[in-house]
Image (cartoon, coloured by chain):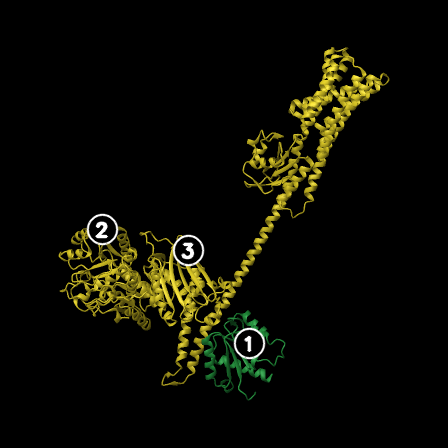
């Protein structure tokens, strides 16, 4: 675990759901998450721009985005050493078995189904980030 | 002996030819016989001489003459199979005459004369043989062989004559020459028989070859041949073996129409009509085209014309699969075919029929396979679309749910202080707006599902277009104002037939889209036109526009295009639903758009408005909701007409009871119809006003109020708030039993009934209400959490609402039905006066639509008479009439006790001069110019919720223009 605060990228097109994640982060008891910097992207293009400019520890990724499937973001990491990649958590309303399978096949570390409650999101975040860091 | 044998044989051959001719009457056979008649006669004479002694000399002379004519006769025979120039005919005839003359005149010819005659004879024969040989070369198949034989036979005959003559001249060779000549003659005759009348074995030989060629051609045909290709191949083979100039085939088919296959013809795509086959089959063999033109089908005549054919031979084409077709040979010259040869070709057509059928079966198989592939593809597309929809649905539903559950869960984690939690206010807002969004989404999905399952029930009625549009615009006005959009509405009066609620939904969807995608300060136009049996309502914005590639996609479910940031508000189903709603009305939605310039969505609905007089030119486009209304201040101080009509407390001095509204420039030019409709629109409002304020005509129709039967306190409070907010008196009962008792105690104007009640169910209450003769006519609105519309309506409810109840829908329906429920006795009686019969018709029709009884009068005098004899609640009068003007009318009415006190609504196209004492505005109840600006304003007023609370009338004062009015709570108190 590093000393610098975590940087988490939230890719979500719905305003209220972004607000929800923000609210959850302010209310969480986990100090690692409470101090984390939350970077927000409304779509894939913005998400790519954030990823190109600096390291993030985790990505909370909505799959159904206005400019394409969130899973295409994972293609950008293909070929990189697996561990030098942020934890990617699919946060999605797509819960059909084939949609879940597609998310896992694409390399998501975890899937959080909408609707979720705070604990589900924070647990997925801490688990994935810890796994990546301990690796 | 040999000669005798030859002669006998020749006689037999000749006799056979003769019998054949007699039987068939074939001109070719006749000519063949003529050619050989001379030789036959000579031979017969010779035989007779040997058996019976010297025959008469004359007989021999005739035989000789015939013999010398033979070259000419041969040329004639040749002419049957190929044209021979006329000069050649004449030359041959001349040669014959020249040859015969010396023979007849001098029985003993000199050698030189004999040589000359012989030369002429042989030349004639050789020319004929040459012509036949050339014709043979130009033909194919068996005709070629047969014509070659004929040519050789002709030459052989010439040789026979030469040999015989030689024998006559040179004594030593007499017998040899004669025998040789006889043999040649016999060979020639046999050759002719083979050529022109082949015997059975010759034909069998030929048939075998033909069968072989036809079958082989068909069997070697590629398996991919279509039936028509097979028939063309068959026709081509027939043409080759028969030597016909052209061949066509009409195959046997079960359907009435047959495609013709051809060979040697340019035209290919020809269809033979019904009866063509039998008409062709009724023709004789080698029918002459010109002589039989009337019996030959047109297309066959065209074919014959194309190749210049003069002869047509048709033979049946029997198919082993049933049915009869026809094979037709077209020839420029007479064919050498005997009838049964052609028939054979027809029989061979059975092979072609089988091959063609095979092709047809394969074609059908291919078609079925393709169809199957297509439907499989369609099915998998549909299945894909279904799972796509499911995936989208899951996403779309979970997105708002996520906010609702997520935020409310966070709230539960907030600190509670004495039973209350302090939570950030925006969390509550987020939950609320997500909940609303979720509800919209569910409603849209349900509507879409209903439409797609064909279970959307429409309740069509005649809907006033301007009202529909203005209601939609007014609902969205806050949004329009927030974005400071310039709105223009140009919707002329008129109706459209459709479900009011659904049409509103369509307009709301399109309008809110237009607002959403138009930047601040943009323009927004709603206009309607009628043309070509269609009502077109267009919504035009100066928004972002839609890329042409996306213009169709916007109508698909969950397909939002363009700027991502603007997507948030919609469900992604609005346009899909809009399109289907319009389609279920028999209409369509069109979109035109230029990115960056704006979009135009047009709803096209079938126009089935009954003709109620010509709306007149210039009415379209000049009605504008945005147009300001300029209430003209009355010198005595005035208030708006509608406030006046509602009995506003703001009423000033008596004179101020009347308000004159004249829009600047709204002069007489304003179309009469618009004015009439506008005035009619106010009638419903007037009705209320009159009810409330004029004791003489007051009908306590709303005193019963609305009875709400609902056990759940919060739901009851909500509906009660809605209804009371709209000015209705609401009584509440919490059980069905109480509700029934309350209704029986005091008949309500309407009942709003919940289904799930503690005691007897709402259905039972509804049933009992409908059984009660006193309460049967009270409109009942059923409210329930589940959609059981069908049950409700079948039990007699007037409408059904699913909780949560939409406020506007409930109020619209309640207002409408409570107003309608007035029965004959209760209905308002209006006298309409106008000298323009057309305007009168329009006024009357529009008022009747508003459930008002109308009596019309074309003159002021008639109006006065009617007003004295009948009782009316209101008079609507033209101001300027030829006989009695509106003012005199009012005076006349006023002075009569029977009609005094009647409110008069003056409709005028004339701008009124300042009120003068005794002028119209001092007396009339209201004055309406025929101008749409006012019409729109009146509609606004009408759209205000009615205030029903009516103070009991004092009874003493006659509430009429000129006296101080009774007051009711003004509408501003409720809004």
Give the quarter of the figure containing the C terminus of chain B: bottom left
Q: Give the chain letter at badge 2.
A: B
Q: Quadrant of residue B441?
A: bottom left
Q: Can residue B201 be spotted in the picture?
A: no
Q: Is residue A45 left or right of residue B488?
A: right
Q: Could you tell me which secondary element the residue under label 1 belongs to?
A: helix
Q: Tell which of B794 and B886 is nearer to you.
A: B886
Q: Residue at position x 75%, y 15% from top?
A: B103
Image spot of residue B399 (x, y percent)? 46, 73
Q: Residue at position x 33%, y 73% from top?
A: B714
Q: Are marks 2 and 1 in contact (CB under 8 Å)?
A: no
The numbered mark at residue B586 is 3
Chain B drawing hue: yellow
Which of the two marks, 2 or 1, is nearer to us in this view?
A: 2
Q: Are marks 3 and 1 in contact (CB under 8 Å)?
A: no
Q: Quadrant of residue B358?
A: top right
Q: Could you tell me which secondary element the residue under label 3 belongs to?
A: loop
Residue annotated with mark 1: A48
Q: Could you tell me which secondary element the residue under label 2 belongs to?
A: loop
Question: In the picture, which chain is green?
Answer: A
Up-down: is B11 above or below B536? above
């Amino acid at each position: 675990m590093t000393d610098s605060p975590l940087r988490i990228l939230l890719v979500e097109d719905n305003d209220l759901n972004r607000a929800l994640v923000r609210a959850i982060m302010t209310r969480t008891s986990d100090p690692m998450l409470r101090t984390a910097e939350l970077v927000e992207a409304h779509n894939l293009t913005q998400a790519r721009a954030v990823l190109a400019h600096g390291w993030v520890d985790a990505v909370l990724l909505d799959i159904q985005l206005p400019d394409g499937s969130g899973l295409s973001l994972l293609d950008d990491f293909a070929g990189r050493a697996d561990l030098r990649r942020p934890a990617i958590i699919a946060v999605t309303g797509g819960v059909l078995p084939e949609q879940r399978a597609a998310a896992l096949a694409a390399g998501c570390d975890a899937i959080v189904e909408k609707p979720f409650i705070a604990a589900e999101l924070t647990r997925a975040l801490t688990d994935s980030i810890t796994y990546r860091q301990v690796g | 002996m040999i000669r005798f044998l030859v002669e006998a044989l020749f006689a037999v051959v000749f006799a056979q030819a003769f019998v054949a001719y007699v039987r068939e009457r074939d001109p070719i056979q006749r000519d063949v016989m003529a050619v050989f008649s001379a030789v036959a006669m000579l031979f017969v004479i010779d035989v007779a001489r040997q058996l019976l002694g010297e025959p008469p000399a004359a007989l021999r002379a005739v035989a000789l003459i015939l013999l010398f004519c033979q070259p000419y006769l041969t040329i004639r025979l040749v002419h049957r199979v190929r044209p021979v120039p006329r000069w050649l005919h004449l030359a041959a005839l001349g040669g014959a005459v020249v040859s015969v003359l010396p023979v007849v005149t001098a029985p003993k010819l000199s050698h030189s004369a004999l040589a000359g005659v012989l030369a002429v004879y042989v030349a004639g024969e050789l020319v004929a043989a040459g012509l036949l040989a050339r014709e043979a070369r130009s033909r194919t198949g068996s005709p070629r062989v047969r014509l070659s034989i004929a040519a050789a036979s002709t030459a052989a005959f010439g040789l026979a004559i030469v040999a015989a003559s030689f024998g006559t001249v040179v004594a030593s060779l007499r017998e040899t020459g004669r025998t040789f000549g006889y043999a040649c003659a016999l060979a020639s005759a046999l050759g002719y028989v083979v050529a022109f009348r082949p015997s059975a074995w010759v034909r069998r030989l030929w048939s075998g070859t033909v069968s072989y060629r036809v079958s082989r051609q068909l069997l070697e045909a590629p398996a991919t041949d279509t039936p028509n290709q097979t028939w063309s191949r068959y026709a081509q083979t027939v043409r080759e073996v028969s030597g016909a100039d052209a061949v066509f085939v009409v195959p046997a088919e079960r359907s009435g129409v047959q495609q013709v296959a051809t060979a040697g013809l340019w035209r290919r795509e020809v269809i033979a009509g019904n009866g063509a086959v039998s008409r062709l089959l009724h023709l004789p063999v080698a029918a002459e085209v010109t002589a039989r033109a009337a019996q030959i089908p047109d297309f066959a005549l065209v074919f014959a014309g194309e190749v210049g054919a003069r002869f047509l031979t048709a033979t049946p084409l029997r198919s082993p699969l049933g049915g009869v077709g026809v094979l037709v040979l077209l020839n420029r010259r007479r064919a050498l075919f005997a009838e049964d040869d052609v028939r054979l070709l027809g029989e061979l057509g059975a092979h072609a029929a089988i091959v063609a059928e095979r092709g047809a079966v394969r074609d059908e198989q291919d078609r079925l396979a393709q169809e199957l592939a297509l439907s499989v593809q369609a099915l998998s597309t549909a299945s894909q679309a279904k799972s796509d929809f499911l995936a989208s649905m899951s996403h779309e539903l979970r997105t708002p749910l996520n906010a609702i559950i997520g935020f409310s869960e966070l709230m539960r984690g907030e600190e509670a202080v004495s039973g209350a939690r302090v939570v950030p206010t925006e969390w509550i807002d987020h939950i609320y707006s997500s909940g609303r969004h979720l509800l919209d989404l569910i409603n849209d999905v349900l509507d879409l599902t209903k439409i797609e399952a064909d279970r959307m029930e429409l309740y069509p009625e005649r809907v006033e277009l301007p009202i529909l549009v203005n209601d939609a615009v007014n609902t969205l006005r806050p949004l329009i104002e927030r974005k400071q959009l310039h709105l223009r509405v140009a919707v002329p009066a008129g109706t459209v037939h459709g479900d009011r609620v659904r049409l509103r939904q369509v307009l709301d969807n399109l309008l809110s889209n237009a607002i959403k995608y138009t930047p601040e300060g943009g323009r927004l136009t709603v206009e309607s036109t009628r043309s070509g049996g269609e009502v077109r309502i267009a919504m035009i914005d100066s928004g972002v526009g839609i890329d042409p590639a996306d213009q169709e996609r916007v109508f698909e479910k969950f397909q939002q295009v363009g700027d991502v940031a603007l997507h948030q508000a919609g469900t992604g189903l609005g346009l899909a639903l809009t399109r289907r709603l319009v389609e279920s009305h028999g209409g369509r939605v069109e979109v035109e758009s230029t990115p960056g310039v704006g979009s135009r969505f047009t709803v096209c609905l079938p126009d089935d408005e009954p003709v109620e007089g010509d709306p007149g030119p210039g009415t379209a486009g000049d009605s504008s909701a945005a147009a300001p209304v300029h209430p003209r201040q009355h010198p005595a101080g005035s208030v708006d007409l509608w406030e006046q009509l509602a009995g506003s407390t703001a009423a000033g001095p008596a004179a101020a009871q009347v308000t004159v509204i004249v829009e600047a420039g709204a002069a007489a030019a304003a179309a009469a119809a618009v004015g009439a409709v506008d005035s009619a629109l106010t009638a419903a409002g007037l009705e209320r006003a009159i009810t409330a304020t004029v004791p003489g005509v007051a009908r306590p129709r709303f005193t019963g109020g609305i009875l709400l039967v609902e056990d759940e306190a919060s739901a009851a409070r909500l509906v009660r708030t809605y209804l009371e907010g709209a000015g209705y008196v609401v009584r509440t009962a919490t059980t069905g039993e109480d509700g029934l008792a309350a209704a029986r105690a005091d008949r309500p104007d309407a009942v709003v009934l919940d289904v799930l009640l503690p005691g007897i169910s709402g259905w039972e209450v509804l049933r009992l209400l409908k059984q009660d003769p006193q309460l049967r006519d009270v409109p009942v609105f059923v409210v329930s959490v589940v959609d059981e519309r069908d049950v409700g309506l079948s039990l007699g409810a007037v409408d059904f609402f699913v909780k949560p109840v939409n406020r506007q829908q409930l109020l619209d329906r309640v207002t409408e039905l409570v107003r309608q429920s007035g029965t004959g006795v209760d209905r308002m009686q209006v006298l309409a006066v106008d000298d323009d019969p057309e305007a009168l018709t329009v006024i009357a029709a529009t008022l009747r639509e508003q459930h008002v009884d109308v009596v019309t009068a074309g003159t002021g005098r008639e109006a006065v008479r009617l007003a004295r004899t009948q009782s009316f609640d209101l008079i609507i009068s033209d101001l300027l009439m030829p006989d009695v003007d509106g003012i005199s009318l009012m005076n006349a009415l006023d002075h009569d006790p029977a009609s005094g006190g009647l409110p008069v609504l003056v409709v005028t196209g004339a701008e009124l001069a300042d009120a003068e004492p005794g002028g119209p505005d001092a007396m009339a109840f209201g004055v309406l110019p025929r101008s749409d600006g006012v019409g729109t304003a009146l509609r606004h007023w009408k759209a205000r919720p009615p205030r029903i609370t009516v103070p009991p009338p004092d009874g003493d004062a006659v509430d009429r223009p000129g006296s101080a009015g009774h007051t009711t709570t003004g509408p501003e108190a409720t809004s």
